[in-house]
Image (spheres, rainbow, N blue to C red):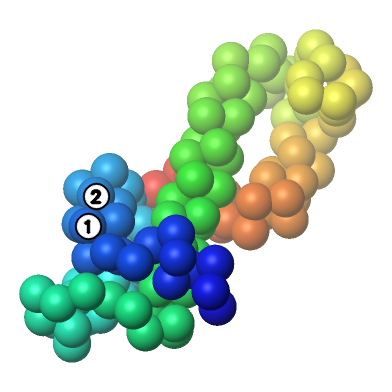
Amino acid sequence: MARYVKEFANATMLAEKYIKRCPEAGKMNDEIRRILNVHEKGLITDYEAVKCIVDASERCSQISQAKELWVQFGEVPMNPETEEIEAEWHGFSAGTHREDIWHWFEETFNVSVAKDLMGL
């Protein structure tokens, strides 16, 4: 608990930066806005509120990393008939089916390929 309060004594500022920097994480932005409204303009020192903001910031980083890799994955040549990659990529050998890689994204980054990466 002391870590969060010490590092983020003024979590309001952190929350506002986070909301501007990571607009794609809408649910977390709504949660942070709720926390900011509850605490109005004062310092957020409540452990749970600060932890929520820190978690949201970490989640934003996680989604950003997944999106960067997703773009790279999109550049890998793939056989349209078999839906297998034709070149090694990120530890996956040529011949790996795209859905195996999609499952890896979902498990590694705790994201939904359809929702978070493809925007469906």
Residue 100 horizontal/vertical position (percent):
80, 43
Query: Relative to residue 30, is residue 109 drawn left or right?
Result: right
- Quadrant in which residue 84 is drawn: top right
Q: CA distance from mark 2 to mark 1?
A: 6 Å
What type is the residue that disc 2 sits on?
Lys
As rendered, which of 56 and 45 lies closer to the eye? Answer: 45
Residue wearing tag 1: 13
Q: Quadrant of residue 44?
A: bottom left
* 10 Å crowding of disc 2: few (<14), some (14-19), many (20+): few
Q: Amino acid at mark 1?
A: Met
Compared across the picture, whether 3 is left or right of 96 comes to left
Question: What residue is at 83 percent from the left and 16 percent from the top?
Answer: 88
At horizontal 29% and vertical 56% (from top left) the residue drawn is: 14
Q: Is residue 14 above or below residue 101?
A: below
**Residue 64: image location, x then y, percent:** 48, 40
Q: Are marks 2 and 1 in contact (CB under 8 Å)?
A: yes
Viewer-closest of 27 and 55 = 55
Residue 79 screen position, x and y as percent: 73, 19
User: Can you see residue 103?
Assistant: yes
**Mark 1 surroundings within 10 Å by alpha-carbon count, few (fewer than 14), some (14 through 19), many (20 or more):** few
Identify the mark at residue 17; answer none if there is no mark: 2
Q: Which type of secondary structure does the marked residue at label 2 adopt?
A: helix
Q: Residue furthest left?
A: 41
- Residue 41 sits in quarter: bottom left
Q: Residue at x 45, y 65 (%)?
A: 6
Given residues 25 and 48, the one toward you in this image is 48
User: Residue drawn 50% across and 56% down?
Assistant: 59
**Can you give x and y, in whole percent of width and height, for residue 93 in the image?**
90, 22
Of the pair 78 and 25, the residue shown nearer to us: 25
Can you tell which of label 2 and label 1 is closer to the viewer? 1
